[in-house]
Amino acid sequence: MKFILLFLGILLLLWYLAPLASGIFNVGNAIGILASVFLVCFGFAFYKIPDSFRTALLFFMAASVAVVILPLSVNMAKYANYKENEGVPTVIVLGCKVNGTAPSKYLYDRCRKAYDYLENNPNAVAVLSGGQGPDEGISEAECMKNVLVELGIDENRLYQEDKSTNTRENLEFSLDVIEKNSLSRDVLIVTNEFHEYRAKLICDRLGLNFHSSCSNSSLYTFLTFYTRELMGLVKIKLFGA
């Protein structure tokens, strides 16, 4: 067990540190780094800890995985690419980081996923949802519109929601756009795979009929964003969407 804890801790630590090379630091890798260091320290001190305390720590870790992490992870996998996608009339593309006026990789990947769907479903329209952060040159919505128009999508099929600052606001404010323009509540959410389940919970609360089409995350950043998403899901489960 000592060597398993050491190996797992070091492996996870390297995985959580990797996104720092690209300037990515958020609550996901912050918590992950702390958890990884704990595993390494636990491994080094494994046989020096009193038996009862060591057993309690192992039980707590196993219970956390079984009761929290595993069920949430199963649902995260379940609601990525959920239901039949073809024919859904309203696409909602959730925003992500803009670097100046250019999309980050995750935002561009979401735009590409939305483009593929809009090309194959010419009667569908898209709500592009995301405000402008203090370090962004333009809103995420405007950036997505620029990408999709450049790819060949008619701008008349694109609606911008440029005030939101988080996932809940993304969907609440997108619903305002949907109602204002008499669009269908049957929606296809385009975001990364780890993000779809939380979007589904919020859609349920808002009365939106949820479908999903996910873009895939980079392997070296996946664990960081997955962990951040787990924190968001725990918050929703404790305090509501």
Image (cartoon, rainbow, N blue to C red):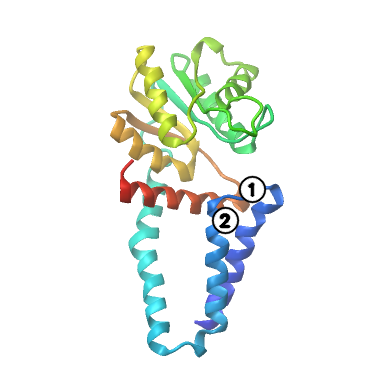
Front-lying residue, 137 or 220: 137
On the image, the x and y values in percent for residue 44 come to 57, 82
* Residue pictured at 68% horizontal, 26% vertical: 101
* Residue pictured at 47% horizontal, 46% vertical: 194
| Residues marked 1 and 2 touching at CB (< 8 Å) | yes
Name the residue type under label 1: Ile
Give the farthest residue toward the front. Answer: 134
Q: Secondary structure at mark 1?
A: loop
Q: Residues within 10 Å of mark 1 (few under 14, many from 20)?
A: some
How far apart are the two marked residues, 1 and 2, measured between alpha carbons?
9 Å
On the image, the x and y values in percent for residue 122 come to 48, 15
Position of residue 42 relative to residue 20, above or below, is below
Front-lying residue, 94 or 136: 136
Q: Is residue 99 toward the left or the right of residue 90 in the image? A: right
Q: Which residue is mark 1?
A: 24
Question: For residue 29, which numbered disc appears in the image?
Answer: 2
* Quadrant in the picture for residue 212: top left
Question: Is tag 1's residue or tag 2's residue first in the polypeptide sequence?
Answer: 1
Question: For residue 179, which numbered disc appears in the image?
Answer: none
On the image, the x and y values in percent for residue 169 come to 42, 31
Q: Is residue 4 visible?
A: no
Task: Tell me the quadrant of the picture where the C terminus can be found.
Answer: top left
